[in-house]
Amino acid sequence: MKAEKLTRVLDMVDKRPSKVTFLTTSGRIVEAVKLVNKMAKMDYKPDIITYGTIMNGFCTIGKTNEAIGLFRKMEERNLELNVVLYNTIIDSLCNDRLVTEALNFFTKLTSKGIRPNIFTYNSLIQGLCNFGRWKETTKLWNEMVERKIMLDVRTFNILVDAFGKEGMLKEANKVFDVMIQRGVEPDTITYNSLIDSYCLQNRMDEAVKSYCRIFVHLEFGVLDGCVLIGPPS
């Protein structure tokens, strides 16, 4: 009987990564959880990969509270939590517009000596910009620079779009200039955000000038009067 039980457990463990992942990515989270619980009853303890897969599945369908519950369970089991797991929760909280809660997780992450990465900062910056919390956004920007974290195109796009929608066109253009100076190649999202910023303010002449400015950059790789300036304090 014991041999039979062991065989069943080993068979489930053998198939566990692919099966749990399949169920999770198919949106069948409840089934994935049931499978993990069944394995747990058969003396198999889910590892960080299994928990992380299901946690990500919960976040994907907007069940952040359930994901946090799994996160707590991992903590109780003293599993070694990494930046990817923290990022999953932080990003989901920001998507739920629970930015303060996301910042609490960020504080917890850093207090445990885990190094945040570009994905951590991008999620938080997006969340803060959504609420116009510019001072905290600037603080995170400065932290990224101090930690020598390479800002990517998404970082700049978030700021250009956020400043533009708030009518802060001067700041949006400064961010764009910094982007060029740092060697980060703008994409269509960058350009559209910048041009839309002027259109939203009914400043069509400047929208056209901005378009021409972007065209010059695309054709010749230069911009007139670039200045290295950070976001406003």
Image (tube, rainbow, N blue to C red):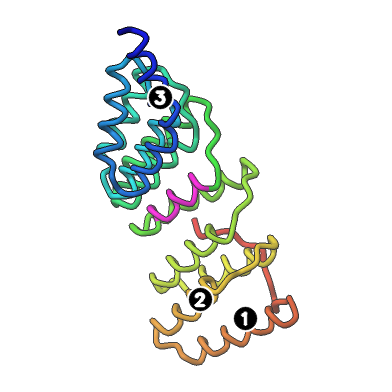
Q: Which of marks 1 and 2 is nearer the N terminus?
A: 2
For disc 2, the neighbor class at 10 Å (few under 14, some 14 to 19, many from 20) is many
Helix, strand or loop status at disc 3: helix
Helix, strand or loop status at disc 1: helix
Calculate the distance from the C-alpha at mark 1 to the C-alpha at mark 3. Answer: 58 Å
Describe residue 179's horizontal placement relative to residue 108 as left or right. Answer: right
x and y percentages locating residue 135 in the rendered image: 43, 52
Report the mark closest to the observer, 2 or 3. Answer: 3
In the rendered structure, are the residues bearing label 1 and label 2 in contact, judged by CB atoms less than 8 Å apart? yes
In magenta, the rendered stretch is 119-128
x and y percentages locating residue 6 in the rendered image: 37, 13
Describe residue 26's horizontal placement relative to residue 151 as left or right. Answer: left
Residue underneath mark 3: 11
- Answer above or below: position of 147 versus 77: below
Q: Which mark is residue 194?
A: 2
Q: Main SS type for the magenta part? A: helix
Question: Which residue type does callout 1 highlight?
Answer: Ile
Residue underneath mark 1: 214
